[in-house]
Image (cartoon, helix red, strand yellow):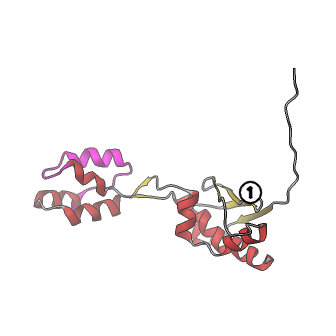
Amino acid sequence: MSSPDVHVQEKTLLEIKVNTPPQNPAYRSCTWAEFLIDPYEKRVIITSDGGNMNYQWQKVSEENTPRDFYKFLTGLNRDYLLCKLSQPSVFDFDKTVDALLKIATDPRLRYALEQARPFFSEYEFATWYMSQPGTHSDDLEAIRMDYPEGHKAAVDLFIQCVQPVITNML
């Protein structure tokens, strides 16, 4: 029987731990986060009480050096980071109702939407909505989703705390 081929490589990674003070707006959704940055593999790993996320980029510059990756990270904005690290998976009742009110023509449906109690699941809402007068299944394309609050808070901490640390390292 042949032995497995094993490769070992020691690398230097950057780890930044953030404890959110209670007065910080992110505190409600993320009280702590650990950011692990691997500049060799072009990867960011976030472990937090607001959720865990990670993403690996393929190429960030022509030379694609660790320093280039750090510089790349300092220029990222919130929307881009959320798009890479997370997915909109939380039903957004208010934005959904606003979107449906823009397309609703039946006055009974408009009234029902304006009086609707908040729903916390897209399935519950869709079931209720389709039972109302003047609806069409195509209307369900107006359902809006958002990123989890914990993910948004962790990304905000990346921008507030991690990006300045990396900028000072460069």
- Which of the pair 140/48 is nearer the observer? 140
* 2 shown above or below 61: above
| Residue 106 pos. (x, y %) | 11, 59
In the rendered view, does 99 fall on the left or right side of 156? left
**Few, some or many C-alpha atoms within 10 Å of disc 1 (few <14, some 14-19, many ≥20)?**
some
Relative placement, left or right, of 28 versus 99 is right
The local secondary structure at tag 1 comes to loop
Quadrant in which residue 70 is drawn: bottom right
Can residue 81 be seen here? The reply is: yes
Quick one: 24 or 17, which is closer to the camera? 17
Amino acid at dot 1: Glu
The correct choice, above or below, for 2 with respect to 149 in the image is: above
Q: Residue at x 57, y 71 (%)?
A: 25
Q: Residue at x 61, y 61 (%)?
A: 30
Q: Residue at x 29, y 57 (%)?
A: 142
The single residue placed furthest to the top in the displayed view is: 1
Say above or below: 5 vs 31: above
> Residue 134, relative to residue 61: is it above or below?
above
The C terminus, quarter of image? bottom right
Furthest residue in direction left, as rendered: 107
Whether residue 72 is in magenta: the answer is no
Residue 10, given in percent of the width and then of the height, sits at 88, 53
Span colored in magenta: 114-136
- Find residue 100 and report its image quarter: bottom left
Q: Which residue is mark 1?
A: 41
Q: Which x, y percent locates residue 31?
A: 65, 61
Give the residue drawn at x 61%, y 72%.
76
> Is-magenta flag for residue 127?
yes
Number of numbered discs overlaid on the protein picture: 1
Question: Residue 155 in the image: x percent, y percent?
Answer: 60, 65
Residue 27 visible somewhere in the drawing = no
